[in-house]
Amino acid sequence: MANGWSLLIGLLFIVVFSAVSWFASPKGDNQTVWRSTLILSAWSCYLMWAITFLAQWHPLIAPKRSDLRPEFVHHEGPRFF
Amino acid sequence: MAPHKDTLFRSADMSLTQLYIANEIGREVVSALGELGIMAFRDLNSETSAFQRTFTQEIRRLDNVERQLRYFQQQMEKSNIPMRSLYEFDNNLAAPSASEIDELADRSHALEQRIQSLNDSYETLKKRETELTEWRWVLREAGGFFDRARGQTEEIRQSIEEDDAPLLRDVEQHGQNGEPTGDRSFSVMNIGFVAGVIPRERIAAFERILWRTLRGNLYMNQSEIPEPIINPENNEEINKNVFVIFAHGKEIINKIRKISESLGADIYNVDENSELRRDQIQEVNTRLGDLANVLGNTKRTLDAELTQIGRSLAAWMIIIKKEKAVYQTLNRFSYDQQRKTLIAEAWCPTNSLGLIKSTLQDVNDRAGLSVPTIVNQIKTSKTPPTYVKTNKFTLGFQTIIDAYGTAKYTEVNPGLPTIVTFPFLFAVMFGDFGHGFIMTCAAVAMIYFEKPLSRGKQDELFSMAFFGRYIMLMMGIFSMYTGLIYCDAFSKELALFPSMWEVPDFKANETVEFIRKEGYTYPFGMDWRWHDTENDLLFSNSYKMKLSILLGWAHMTYSLCLSYINARHFKSPIDIFANFIPGMVFFQSIFGYLVFTIIYKWSIDWYAIGKSPPGLLNMLIYMFLQPGTVEEELYPGQAGVQVFLLLAAVVCVPIMLFLKPFYLRWEHNRARAMGYRGIGENTHVSTLDDDDEEPQGMNGNNHRQSMGSDEGGALITQDIGGGDGDEHEEFEFSEVMIHQVIHTIEFCLNCVSHTASYLRLWALSLAHQQLSIVLWSMTLANAFSFTGATGVFAIFFFFVVWFFLTIAVLVVMEGTSAMLHSLRLHWVEAMSKHFIGEGVPFEPFSFETMLEEEMAELK
């Protein structure tokens, strides 16, 4: 579901979001604040997400545990989505 | 009118204006401008002392009224009468008229006298009451001593008569007559006594002194008064003791009196005869009763009076404070005797000129004056003050920047990006969904109850948090986001998506290594399967370290770009070519390259292509130590690229060092050759030239003198000459060179140290995460091992402990430390890249800010 293309799709999404925030920011005294805050937030969040994604893209080590008991392990694990 | 709007991006355009105000409406004009709060008046009389100014009389009168009002407030506090709150006056910002002020002054004067006389009589009565109460206690307690003493007289007498000093006694017997309180039975024996009341803490000292001075020739009795005595002067309660001292001889009795008076004791008349004493007690009681009656009446009148005052005291205070501020501002104006006009100079935002003019027109119309108030814009070479218009959301962030320094006039204001970068860098260190949620809730609550909270009294810590409530909101929201990225909520994992790791089949007590799902990467944040694994730290340390470097690089590059915008705005292309571009090349060829290699290494599947991943740290070190040799190859052609980048960085250093100083010297020499000279170099004749070199106060000096002697017409043209005031300072090559050398060395070293400094993001987020894991495993994790009814209580108990420690340690303490680190990253690492500073803060004359500062006590 998620692979290397996610980075580019995410980037595209952020670019679109930035463009929309630039034009859709409420006009008036605070327009600059709206624009700068929305766009900077979007890029900061994207940067953080992308770095985390990259770090796990081709991981060099795999998680290890020795305190697991076979009868309790669900191989799929819990999930919300 | 300026073409663009005032935004947070840079400080507002300012104009120096000159106002000509008719003397009659000076007060009204200033008052109206105070309501607007956008003009900073310059002091045109700085050489005159406060007493010589025009409106000193008025200010003195208002000071007196203010003192009277404060006196009322003190009296009300003393008798616990609540004051009607400031916020109940719907119209508390309306400007008062002159007659209102006079009326108020008269009224408060009359009221003061009334309150004072009431107070005086109340205090006298109260004092009388205290004395009577003390006397009653003395009478009551002393009676007990006398009754006891009487039984012992015989023994005492015998013991005395056995003594071999009868002659002495005869002599003293005559002297004893003057003592009125002595009773027959005692006076026979020549024994006198002193009775009184003394504060309890002095009793030990009192005894000791008496014992020493009289060498033990006394008999002292004392008892504690069970209820405290109230001192009428300061309403304090004092515990006191009743004492009766019997001693031998008049001299000694007098000495005792003196000692007791000097120690603050009150001495009362007591009759030894028990019947007389009973009468005395009765008399005292009736007098006390009468007094209580009178006292009650006085107190009621006083309270009623004060309550009446309390209804409008806050409003009076505001009126007087405003009026005083108006006159203080008027004192900064210069007064033209012949034309009966006031002349003022003020800085104001250029965009607000229209508003100011219309306000002045309104005041004029209301006063019905035919002479208009003239607003004149003057061209000047003086540095305008830096004014950044904020609202309640941006105020906190702007304060962070202003705490470091005032930005130069119209330079890029770092406050704008700080709205995001400050809370975001905080969140990188504070990343935990749960803790972020708590912080967001706290901030939302403070914002929701903004009004009642801002009106209530706040202690120091809370008022700080309240001031930064919008910062906290942003910090909380970003912390929730980074918490999701780190996959931490109260140190537990959040399994939002299916993991990219699968658990293979294994036997119990066997170390399992998870297996990667082919072609699937965990889509959002850290994979939750890393939680509680043995090599969790190995992975997350490497990840967070690189994250810190990448974010730091991004933040610093962003800040460096702002210096480009500054250079363009101030139209100094030399700053772009000699500082910005070489600086950027230097920074990017070393740390930009590091960032590139980090990302490149992540994006290659090293096991799939069958190579071992190279270490980036060694690569960077060998890039400097042995340029041209690469031990473990990251990508083909690496050696050449690295040599090129290194050369580029090295070449940038001399460019940064020499280009700007030599360019400036060339420019200076060329100007000289063409015959231009700096104004400051040769002219000390005109009054214009010292405008730039001397502080503001002296400028006012010049105007003032010219105003006193010349006509007003000279004023208008006065500042026009100084339009191109940038080159006033004499060019000194060595100074420029030294400045540039310092800048270059600092920049190059800082590139290294600042990048390293961003590693604090990793260190603090690691500490935060580990601390919350420890807290969980020490409290709630233990509770889950209990079963049955104990389990219920244990879980409840440990939950309470865990929750409070989470709030106190993880949210408040850790939050404060992360905030301070984020603050440092902004002040030092980011702002050093572009911030010029050197600005003068804009301090407009505004009733609102003045009242905010002064009315804290009225809340």
Image (cartoon, rainbow, N blue to C red):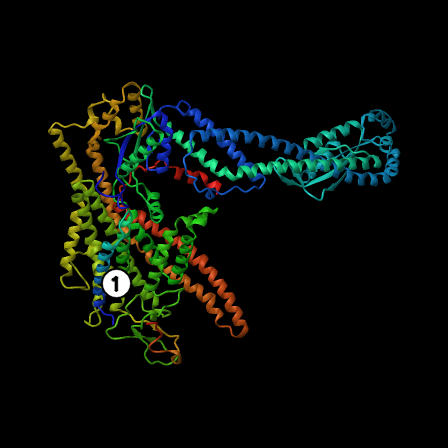
Side of B555 where B653 appears, left or right: left
Q: Residue at x 20, y 37 (%)?
A: B737
* Nearer to the camera, B653 or B705: B705
Q: Which residue is mark 1?
A: A50
Give coordinates of residue B336: x percent, y percent.
32, 21
The image shows residue B220, relative to residue B476, as above or below, that is above
Give coordinates of residue B533: x percent, y percent.
36, 70
Tag 1 subunit = A
Q: Residue at x 19, y 34 (%)?
A: B733
Side of B513 where B629 appears, left or right: left
Secondary element under disc 1, as helix, strand or loop, is: helix
Q: Classify the position of the N terminus of chain B by image quarter.
A: top left
* Nearer to the camera, B660 or B490: B490
- Residue B167 visible in the shown view: yes
The residue type indicated by label 1 comes to Ala
The image shows residue B462, relative to residue B70, as above or below, that is below
